[in-house]
Image (cartoon, rainbow, N blue to C red):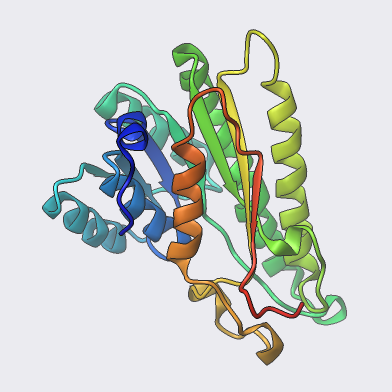
């Protein structure tokens, strides 16, 4: 892993981050990156067994990880998770909204139940978690919310209509949320949109051949670490990442 500078390490040490979707892919890589930087990480996802494996590895390397099995589409579950983090760590500095689904299908052939589930996870779940952490960040007068969007939130692709719709929604939500916390009295909460091209994760299975030039989850995790390690007066609004050889 790339070492942090002294100023970055000081900025990150002992902060607390909630990472949804931490059982695999971008969420997992981000948890490892942030833990390596001294951040105490709360690992949220539905697969508790995978979270425990990740937590054991982080703890064995000198980090501090809390397993909080969570379904982001369950409002009570989300609130219980946030309460547990505050009880355990006393604060919450960073939220990484990484939980997500990708359903690829032509509109006329799409299963609308699957589209609904995708929107519930990618959009409503992200909103639920964000709303739940805001009271803590407001009391602290500090916080950073990072939403994992996608290149598909900027550019639509055939067969990705539902997925693109969900990611365009994430971008719009992030922009509006940022505006709500811009001003002399509320500028302490920052919002960053991360928009990667196609990433080699469990979600990428079944991608068409022309989309198969992909990023590694750790490529995205490095960009997240960069954004959250900036000084408090710097808000990295968005980061768009594409594979170098990507033609789309």
Is residue 6 rendered to the left or right of residue 248? left
- Could one spot residue 46 in this view of the protein? no
Looking at the rendered image, the quarter that the C terminus falls into is: bottom right
- Residue at the top extreme, as displayed: 185
Q: Position of residue 133 (x, y in %)?
A: 50, 29
Location of residue 162 with respect to 175 vertically, above or below: below
Looking at the rendered image, the quarter that the N terminus falls into is: bottom left
Instruction: Pick the residue in front: 10 or 66.
Output: 10
> What residue is shown at x 35% (from left), y 23% (from top)?
91
Q: Position of residue 48 (x, y in %)?
A: 31, 57
- Could one spot residue 26 in this view of the protein? yes
Is residue 47 rendered to the left or right of residue 116? left
> What residue is shown at x 60% (from left), y 54% (from top)?
121
Is residue 164 rendered to the left or right of residue 139? right
- Residue 63 sits in quarter: top left
- Residue 115 sits in quarter: bottom right
Location of residue 111 with respect to 50 vertically, above or below: below
- Residue 27 sits in quarter: bottom left
Location of residue 74 with respect to 195 vertically, above or below: above
Instruction: Pick the residue in front: 67 or 231.
Output: 231
Q: Position of residue 129 (x, y in %)?
A: 54, 38
Number of numbered discs present? 0
> What residue is shown at x 62% (from left), y 74% (from top)?
244
> What residue is shown at x 74% (from left), y 37% (from top)?
175
Instruction: Pick the residue in front: 202 or 83.
Output: 202
């Amino acid at each position: 892993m790339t070492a942090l500078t002294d100023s970055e390490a000081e900025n990150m040490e002992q902060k607390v981050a909630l990472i949804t979707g931490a059982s695999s892919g971008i969420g997992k890589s981000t948890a490892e990156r942030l833990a390596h930087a001294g951040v105490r990480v709360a690992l949220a996802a539905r697969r508790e067994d995978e979270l425990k494996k990740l937590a054991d590895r982080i703890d064995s390397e000198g980090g501090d990880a809390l397993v909080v099995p969570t379904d982001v589409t369950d409002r009570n579950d989300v609130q219980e998770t946030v309460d547990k983090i505050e009880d355990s760590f006393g604060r919450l500095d960073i939220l990484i909204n990484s939980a997500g689904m990708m359903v690829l299908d032509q509109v006329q052939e799409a299963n609308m139940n699957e589209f609904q589930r995708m929107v519930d996870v990618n959009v409503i779940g992200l909103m639920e978690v964000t709303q739940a952490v805001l009271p803590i960040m407001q009391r602290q007068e500090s916080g950073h919310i990072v939403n994992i969007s996608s290149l598909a939130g900027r550019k639509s692709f055939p067969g990705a209509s539902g997925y693109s719709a969900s990611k365009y929604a994430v971008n719009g939500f992030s922009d509006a949320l940022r505006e709500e916390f811009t001003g002399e009295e509320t500028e302490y909460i920052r919002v960053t949109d991360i928009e990667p091209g196609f990433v080699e994760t469990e979600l990428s299975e079944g991608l068409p051949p022309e989309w198969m030039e992909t990023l590694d989850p750790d490529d995205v995790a490095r960009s997240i670490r960069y954004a959250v390690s900036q000084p408090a007066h710097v808000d990295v609004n968005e980061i768009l990442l594409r594979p170098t050889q990507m033609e789309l």
